[in-house]
Image (cartoon, grey):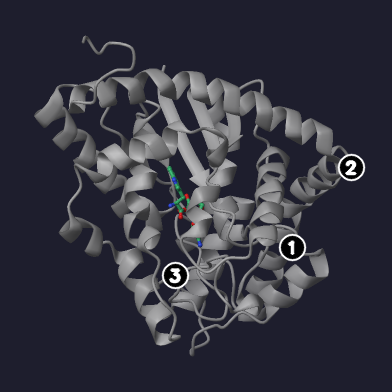
Protein backbone atom coordinates (compact mmCIF):
# COMPACT_ATOMS: atom_id res chain seq x y z
CA UNK A 1 0.00 0.00 0.00
CA UNK A 2 1.23 3.49 -0.80
CA UNK A 3 2.71 5.25 2.23
CA UNK A 4 1.78 8.93 2.50
CA UNK A 5 3.26 11.44 4.95
CA UNK A 6 2.57 15.13 5.39
CA UNK A 7 2.73 17.75 8.07
CA UNK A 8 1.70 21.18 9.20
CA UNK A 9 3.74 23.63 11.30
CA UNK A 10 2.20 25.18 14.42
CA UNK A 11 3.64 28.62 13.71
CA UNK A 12 0.30 30.39 13.43
CA UNK A 13 -3.41 29.79 13.04
CA UNK A 14 -4.16 27.51 10.12
CA UNK A 15 -5.42 29.21 6.98
CA UNK A 16 -7.64 28.60 4.02
CA UNK A 17 -4.38 28.00 2.11
CA UNK A 18 -3.46 25.12 4.41
CA UNK A 19 -6.93 23.69 4.00
CA UNK A 20 -7.38 23.98 0.23
CA UNK A 21 -3.74 23.31 -0.61
CA UNK A 22 -3.24 20.36 1.68
CA UNK A 23 -5.53 19.26 4.53
CA UNK A 24 -8.73 18.86 2.58
CA UNK A 25 -7.16 16.40 0.20
CA UNK A 26 -5.50 14.50 3.05
CA UNK A 27 -8.98 13.89 4.48
CA UNK A 28 -10.94 13.39 1.28
CA UNK A 29 -8.47 11.30 -0.68
CA UNK A 30 -5.17 10.33 0.91
CA UNK A 31 -6.35 8.70 4.10
CA UNK A 32 -8.71 6.45 2.14
CA UNK A 33 -6.37 5.22 -0.52
CA UNK A 34 -3.11 4.86 1.38
CA UNK A 35 -1.40 4.11 4.62
CA UNK A 36 -1.10 7.73 5.71
CA UNK A 37 0.52 9.69 8.53
CA UNK A 38 -0.25 13.33 9.30
CA UNK A 39 1.91 15.19 11.71
CA UNK A 40 1.90 18.45 13.63
CA UNK A 41 5.54 19.25 13.02
CA UNK A 42 6.23 21.23 16.17
CA UNK A 43 10.04 21.00 16.00
CA UNK A 44 9.82 23.06 12.82
CA UNK A 45 8.03 25.82 14.73
CA UNK A 46 11.19 26.45 16.74
CA UNK A 47 13.23 27.57 13.73
CA UNK A 48 12.02 31.16 14.02
CA UNK A 49 11.48 33.47 16.97
CA UNK A 50 8.81 31.74 19.07
CA UNK A 51 6.86 31.88 22.27
CA UNK A 52 6.81 28.47 24.02
CA UNK A 53 3.25 28.80 25.35
CA UNK A 54 1.98 29.83 21.92
CA UNK A 55 3.64 26.89 20.18
CA UNK A 56 2.04 24.53 22.69
CA UNK A 57 -1.36 26.14 22.18
CA UNK A 58 -1.07 26.14 18.39
CA UNK A 59 0.10 22.52 18.35
CA UNK A 60 -3.00 21.45 20.23
CA UNK A 61 -5.16 23.56 17.95
CA UNK A 62 -3.54 22.24 14.77
CA UNK A 63 -4.13 18.66 15.92
CA UNK A 64 -7.81 19.40 16.62
CA UNK A 65 -8.17 21.11 13.26
CA UNK A 66 -6.66 18.14 11.44
CA UNK A 67 -9.32 15.96 13.03
CA UNK A 68 -12.00 18.59 12.43
CA UNK A 69 -11.00 18.68 8.75
CA UNK A 70 -11.92 15.01 8.58
CA UNK A 71 -8.79 13.01 9.36
CA UNK A 72 -10.03 9.81 10.96
CA UNK A 73 -7.68 8.05 13.42
CA UNK A 74 -9.27 4.76 12.35
CA UNK A 75 -7.94 5.35 8.84
CA UNK A 76 -4.67 7.23 9.34
CA UNK A 77 -2.09 8.12 11.97
CA UNK A 78 -2.25 11.62 13.47
CA UNK A 79 0.55 12.63 15.83
CA UNK A 80 2.92 15.31 17.06
CA UNK A 81 6.48 15.23 15.71
CA UNK A 82 8.28 15.83 19.02
CA UNK A 83 6.52 12.80 20.53
CA UNK A 84 8.51 10.54 18.23
CA UNK A 85 12.27 10.70 18.76
CA UNK A 86 13.06 9.07 15.44
CA UNK A 87 12.68 12.35 13.53
CA UNK A 88 15.50 14.13 15.35
CA UNK A 89 17.50 10.93 15.44
CA UNK A 90 17.40 10.52 11.68
CA UNK A 91 17.84 14.21 11.00
CA UNK A 92 21.38 14.19 12.36
CA UNK A 93 22.41 11.31 10.14
CA UNK A 94 20.94 13.04 7.10
CA UNK A 95 22.89 16.18 7.98
CA UNK A 96 25.94 14.04 7.36
CA UNK A 97 24.71 13.40 3.82
CA UNK A 98 23.49 16.92 2.95
CA UNK A 99 25.82 19.76 2.01
CA UNK A 100 26.04 23.28 3.26
CA UNK A 101 25.64 24.68 -0.28
CA UNK A 102 22.48 22.69 -0.90
CA UNK A 103 20.91 24.07 2.28
CA UNK A 104 21.76 27.66 1.43
CA UNK A 105 20.07 27.33 -1.95
CA UNK A 106 16.64 26.61 -0.42
CA UNK A 107 14.29 29.40 -1.45
CA UNK A 108 12.36 29.46 1.81
CA UNK A 109 15.57 29.71 3.78
CA UNK A 110 16.80 32.58 1.65
CA UNK A 111 13.51 34.46 1.97
CA UNK A 112 13.03 33.89 5.68
CA UNK A 113 16.66 34.56 6.57
CA UNK A 114 16.60 37.82 4.58
CA UNK A 115 13.39 38.90 6.33
CA UNK A 116 14.87 38.10 9.72
CA UNK A 117 18.07 40.04 8.97
CA UNK A 118 16.06 43.02 7.71
CA UNK A 119 14.35 43.11 11.07
CA UNK A 120 17.77 43.16 12.69
CA UNK A 121 17.25 39.73 14.21
CA UNK A 122 19.53 36.72 14.08
CA UNK A 123 18.90 33.62 11.99
CA UNK A 124 18.65 30.36 13.90
CA UNK A 125 20.89 27.57 12.66
CA UNK A 126 17.81 25.32 12.69
CA UNK A 127 16.26 27.49 9.95
CA UNK A 128 19.11 26.45 7.70
CA UNK A 129 18.91 22.75 8.60
CA UNK A 130 15.09 22.65 8.65
CA UNK A 131 14.75 20.93 5.24
CA UNK A 132 16.94 18.09 6.52
CA UNK A 133 14.60 17.56 9.44
CA UNK A 134 11.73 17.63 6.97
CA UNK A 135 13.54 15.00 4.87
CA UNK A 136 13.90 12.92 8.04
CA UNK A 137 10.13 13.26 8.70
CA UNK A 138 9.47 11.87 5.26
CA UNK A 139 12.20 9.24 4.91
CA UNK A 140 11.75 7.70 8.39
CA UNK A 141 8.41 6.26 7.27
CA UNK A 142 9.37 4.84 3.89
CA UNK A 143 7.09 7.47 2.37
CA UNK A 144 6.11 7.16 -1.30
CA UNK A 145 4.06 10.34 -1.62
CA UNK A 146 4.09 13.71 0.12
CA UNK A 147 0.91 15.71 -0.53
CA UNK A 148 1.84 19.38 -0.12
CA UNK A 149 1.16 22.81 -1.55
CA UNK A 150 3.54 24.14 -4.22
CA UNK A 151 5.69 26.04 -1.72
CA UNK A 152 7.05 22.73 -0.41
CA UNK A 153 8.11 21.04 -3.63
CA UNK A 154 11.72 22.16 -3.37
CA UNK A 155 11.96 20.66 0.11
CA UNK A 156 10.53 17.36 -1.09
CA UNK A 157 13.06 17.41 -3.95
CA UNK A 158 15.80 17.69 -1.33
CA UNK A 159 14.37 14.69 0.53
CA UNK A 160 14.55 12.76 -2.75
CA UNK A 161 18.15 13.82 -3.37
CA UNK A 162 19.21 12.82 0.14
CA UNK A 163 17.47 9.45 -0.13
CA UNK A 164 19.15 8.69 -3.46
CA UNK A 165 22.57 9.83 -2.22
CA UNK A 166 22.32 7.86 1.02
CA UNK A 167 21.19 4.73 -0.83
CA UNK A 168 24.06 5.04 -3.32
CA UNK A 169 26.71 5.54 -0.65
CA UNK A 170 25.55 3.25 2.10
CA UNK A 171 23.23 0.72 0.51
CA UNK A 172 19.52 0.74 -0.14
CA UNK A 173 17.79 2.09 2.97
CA UNK A 174 15.21 4.71 1.96
CA UNK A 175 12.23 4.80 -0.35
CA UNK A 176 12.60 7.78 -2.71
CA UNK A 177 9.49 9.97 -2.16
CA UNK A 178 7.69 12.32 -4.50
CA UNK A 179 5.55 15.41 -3.93
CA UNK A 180 1.93 15.53 -5.05
CA UNK A 181 -0.15 18.74 -5.30
CA UNK A 182 -3.85 19.46 -5.80
CA UNK A 183 -5.08 20.42 -9.28
CA UNK A 184 -6.45 23.77 -8.07
CA UNK A 185 -5.47 25.88 -5.05
CA UNK A 186 -1.98 24.44 -4.73
CA UNK A 187 -0.99 28.02 -3.97
CA UNK A 188 -3.65 30.20 -2.40
CA UNK A 189 -2.49 33.81 -2.37
CA UNK A 190 -2.86 36.56 0.21
CA UNK A 191 -6.08 38.46 -0.56
CA UNK A 192 -4.39 41.84 -0.16
CA UNK A 193 -1.09 40.89 -1.77
CA UNK A 194 -2.03 38.40 -4.45
CA UNK A 195 1.57 37.85 -5.48
CA UNK A 196 2.48 36.42 -2.04
CA UNK A 197 1.34 33.14 -0.56
CA UNK A 198 -1.44 33.17 2.04
CA UNK A 199 0.93 32.12 4.80
CA UNK A 200 -0.11 31.76 8.43
CA UNK A 201 3.03 33.26 9.84
CA UNK A 202 2.73 36.47 7.83
CA UNK A 203 1.88 39.69 9.58
CA UNK A 204 -0.83 40.81 7.17
CA UNK A 205 -3.93 39.41 8.90
CA UNK A 206 -6.62 41.08 6.78
CA UNK A 207 -5.46 39.27 3.63
CA UNK A 208 -5.51 35.87 5.31
CA UNK A 209 -8.61 33.77 5.89
CA UNK A 210 -8.10 31.65 8.98
CA UNK A 211 -9.95 28.37 9.35
CA UNK A 212 -11.51 29.60 12.57
CA UNK A 213 -12.59 33.02 11.26
CA UNK A 214 -16.27 33.76 11.92
CA UNK A 215 -18.44 33.84 8.74
CA UNK A 216 -18.75 37.61 8.86
CA UNK A 217 -15.01 38.05 9.17
CA UNK A 218 -14.52 35.76 6.16
CA UNK A 219 -17.05 37.77 4.15
CA UNK A 220 -15.38 41.05 5.05
CA UNK A 221 -11.91 39.76 4.12
CA UNK A 222 -13.04 38.36 0.78
CA UNK A 223 -15.06 41.46 -0.12
CA UNK A 224 -11.98 43.60 0.56
CA UNK A 225 -9.68 41.43 -1.55
CA UNK A 226 -7.50 43.39 -3.93
CA UNK A 227 -8.65 43.04 -7.52
CA UNK A 228 -6.80 44.18 -10.57
CA UNK A 229 -7.51 47.20 -12.70
CA UNK A 230 -9.82 46.51 -15.62
CA UNK A 231 -13.42 45.44 -15.42
CA UNK A 232 -13.69 42.18 -17.26
CA UNK A 233 -13.56 38.99 -15.24
CA UNK A 234 -10.84 36.87 -16.86
CA UNK A 235 -8.57 34.15 -15.51
CA UNK A 236 -4.96 35.22 -15.98
CA UNK A 237 -2.52 34.37 -13.22
CA UNK A 238 0.28 36.59 -14.53
CA UNK A 239 -1.60 39.74 -15.49
CA UNK A 240 -4.54 39.55 -13.08
CA UNK A 241 -3.26 37.76 -9.98
CA UNK A 242 -5.92 39.12 -7.60
CA UNK A 243 -8.78 37.97 -9.78
CA UNK A 244 -7.11 34.65 -10.52
CA UNK A 245 -6.76 33.98 -6.80
CA UNK A 246 -10.47 34.60 -6.19
CA UNK A 247 -11.43 32.39 -9.13
CA UNK A 248 -9.19 29.61 -7.87
CA UNK A 249 -10.58 29.86 -4.37
CA UNK A 250 -14.12 29.78 -5.74
CA UNK A 251 -13.28 26.79 -7.96
CA UNK A 252 -11.67 24.97 -5.06
CA UNK A 253 -14.60 25.62 -2.73
CA UNK A 254 -17.61 25.34 -5.01
CA UNK A 255 -16.22 23.13 -7.79
CA UNK A 256 -15.59 24.04 -11.42
CA UNK A 257 -12.71 25.36 -13.41
CA UNK A 258 -11.33 28.88 -12.77
CA UNK A 259 -11.24 29.86 -16.44
CA UNK A 260 -14.81 28.67 -17.03
CA UNK A 261 -16.06 30.34 -13.88
CA UNK A 262 -14.58 33.63 -15.09
CA UNK A 263 -17.00 33.57 -18.05
CA UNK A 264 -19.98 33.49 -15.70
CA UNK A 265 -19.29 36.82 -14.05
CA UNK A 266 -19.54 40.32 -15.36
CA UNK A 267 -18.63 42.12 -12.14
CA UNK A 268 -15.99 41.79 -9.47
CA UNK A 269 -18.59 42.35 -6.77
CA UNK A 270 -20.66 39.32 -7.75
CA UNK A 271 -17.57 37.15 -7.96
CA UNK A 272 -16.44 38.25 -4.50
CA UNK A 273 -19.86 37.64 -3.01
CA UNK A 274 -20.07 34.09 -4.37
CA UNK A 275 -16.49 33.38 -3.36
CA UNK A 276 -17.13 34.59 0.18
CA UNK A 277 -20.22 32.40 0.52
CA UNK A 278 -18.41 29.39 -0.94
CA UNK A 279 -15.59 29.81 1.59
CA UNK A 280 -18.05 30.20 4.48
CA UNK A 281 -19.80 26.96 3.43
CA UNK A 282 -16.53 25.05 3.17
CA UNK A 283 -15.40 26.21 6.61
CA UNK A 284 -18.72 25.68 8.38
CA UNK A 285 -18.47 21.91 9.04
CA UNK A 286 -14.79 22.17 10.00
CA UNK A 287 -15.57 24.87 12.55
CA UNK A 288 -18.52 22.93 13.96
CA UNK A 289 -16.45 19.79 14.43
CA UNK A 290 -13.60 21.80 15.90
CA UNK A 291 -15.93 23.20 18.53
CA UNK A 292 -17.05 19.69 19.47
CA UNK A 293 -13.46 18.55 19.78
CA UNK A 294 -12.56 21.51 21.99
CA UNK A 295 -15.21 20.30 24.40
CA UNK A 296 -13.49 16.92 24.54
CA UNK A 297 -9.73 17.52 24.94
CA UNK A 298 -9.25 14.02 26.37
CA UNK A 299 -10.25 12.55 23.03
CA UNK A 300 -7.69 14.57 21.07
CA UNK A 301 -4.99 13.72 23.59
CA UNK A 302 -5.80 10.02 23.28
CA UNK A 303 -5.62 10.18 19.49
CA UNK A 304 -2.20 11.85 19.68
CA UNK A 305 -0.89 9.36 22.22
CA UNK A 306 -1.92 6.38 20.14
CA UNK A 307 -0.75 8.08 16.96
CA UNK A 308 2.73 8.65 18.38
CA UNK A 309 2.99 5.04 19.50
CA UNK A 310 2.02 3.77 16.08
CA UNK A 311 4.36 6.21 14.34
CA UNK A 312 7.28 5.23 16.56
CA UNK A 313 6.80 1.58 15.65
CA UNK A 314 6.77 2.43 11.96
CA UNK A 315 9.82 4.70 11.97
CA UNK A 316 12.11 2.76 14.27
CA UNK A 317 13.21 -0.04 11.91
CA UNK A 318 14.09 2.37 9.09
CA UNK A 319 16.02 4.73 11.35
CA UNK A 320 17.87 1.78 12.93
CA UNK A 321 18.74 0.53 9.46
CA UNK A 322 20.10 3.97 8.51
CA UNK A 323 22.24 4.05 11.67
CA UNK A 324 23.70 0.66 10.84
CA UNK A 325 24.22 1.46 7.17
CA UNK A 326 26.13 4.68 7.84
CA UNK A 327 28.56 2.95 10.19
CA UNK A 328 27.21 3.44 13.70
CA UNK A 329 27.79 0.50 15.99
CA UNK A 330 24.50 -1.10 17.07
CA UNK A 331 24.13 -1.13 20.85
CA UNK A 332 24.96 -4.41 22.59
CA UNK A 333 27.15 -5.71 19.79
CA UNK A 334 30.57 -4.40 20.87
CA UNK A 335 32.95 -7.31 21.35
CA UNK A 336 35.82 -6.76 23.79
P1 LIG B 1 2.64 25.16 6.59
O1 LIG B 1 1.59 26.19 6.88
O2 LIG B 1 3.83 25.78 5.97
O3 LIG B 1 2.91 24.28 7.73
O4 LIG B 1 2.01 24.24 5.47
C1 LIG B 1 1.21 23.09 5.67
C2 LIG B 1 0.71 22.61 4.33
O5 LIG B 1 -0.18 23.57 3.76
C3 LIG B 1 1.84 22.42 3.31
O6 LIG B 1 1.53 21.29 2.52
C4 LIG B 1 1.79 23.66 2.49
O7 LIG B 1 2.28 23.45 1.18
C5 LIG B 1 0.29 23.96 2.46
N1 LIG B 1 0.06 25.39 2.30
C6 LIG B 1 0.41 26.36 3.18
N2 LIG B 1 0.04 27.58 2.72
C7 LIG B 1 -0.56 27.35 1.52
C8 LIG B 1 -1.16 28.20 0.55
N3 LIG B 1 -1.25 29.52 0.73
N4 LIG B 1 -1.66 27.64 -0.56
C9 LIG B 1 -1.61 26.30 -0.75
N5 LIG B 1 -1.06 25.45 0.12
C10 LIG B 1 -0.54 25.96 1.25
N1 LIG C 1 7.87 22.28 5.80
C1 LIG C 1 6.47 22.03 5.73
C2 LIG C 1 5.73 23.35 5.61
O1 LIG C 1 6.25 24.38 5.95
C3 LIG C 1 5.95 21.29 6.92
C4 LIG C 1 6.57 19.94 6.98
C5 LIG C 1 7.54 19.55 7.85
C6 LIG C 1 6.27 18.83 6.16
N2 LIG C 1 7.83 18.25 7.63
C7 LIG C 1 7.10 17.77 6.62
C8 LIG C 1 5.40 18.63 5.09
C9 LIG C 1 7.08 16.54 6.00
C10 LIG C 1 5.39 17.38 4.48
C11 LIG C 1 6.23 16.34 4.93
O2 LIG C 1 4.62 23.33 5.19
Q: Is residue 209 above or below residue 67?
A: below
The residue that disc 3 covers is 235
Residue 51, percent from left and from top: 63, 65
Q: Closer to the N terminus: mark 1 or mark 3?
A: 3
Give the residue at x 17% y 52%. Answer: 99
Give the residue at x 14% y 22%. Answer: 171
Q: Residues within 10 Å of mark 1 (few under 14, many from 20)?
A: some
**Marks 1/3: CA–CA distance:** 20 Å
Q: Is residue 220 above or below residue 146?
A: below
Give the residue at x 67% y 79%. Answer: 269
Q: Nearer the viewer, mark 1 or mark 2?
A: 2
* Left or right placement of residue 145 versus residue 217 in this view: left
The residue that disc 1 covers is 277
Q: Nearer the viewer, mark 2 or mark 3?
A: 2
* Left or right placement of residue 213 versus residue 198 in this view: right
* Left or right placement of residue 130 versus residue 295 in this view: left
Question: Could one spot residue 239 in this view of the protein?
Answer: no
Q: Classify residue 307 by image quadrant.
A: top right
Mark 3 Cβ and ligand 1 under 8 Å apart: no
Amino acid sequence: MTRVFSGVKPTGHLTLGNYLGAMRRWAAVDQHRSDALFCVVDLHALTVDHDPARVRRLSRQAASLLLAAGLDPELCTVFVQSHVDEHARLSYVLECVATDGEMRRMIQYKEKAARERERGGSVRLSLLTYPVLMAADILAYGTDEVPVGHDQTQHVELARDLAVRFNQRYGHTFVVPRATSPAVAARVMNLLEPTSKMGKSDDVGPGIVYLLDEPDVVRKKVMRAVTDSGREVVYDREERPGLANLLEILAACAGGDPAELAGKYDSYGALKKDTAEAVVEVLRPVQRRHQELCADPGYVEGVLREGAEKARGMARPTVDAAYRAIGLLPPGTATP
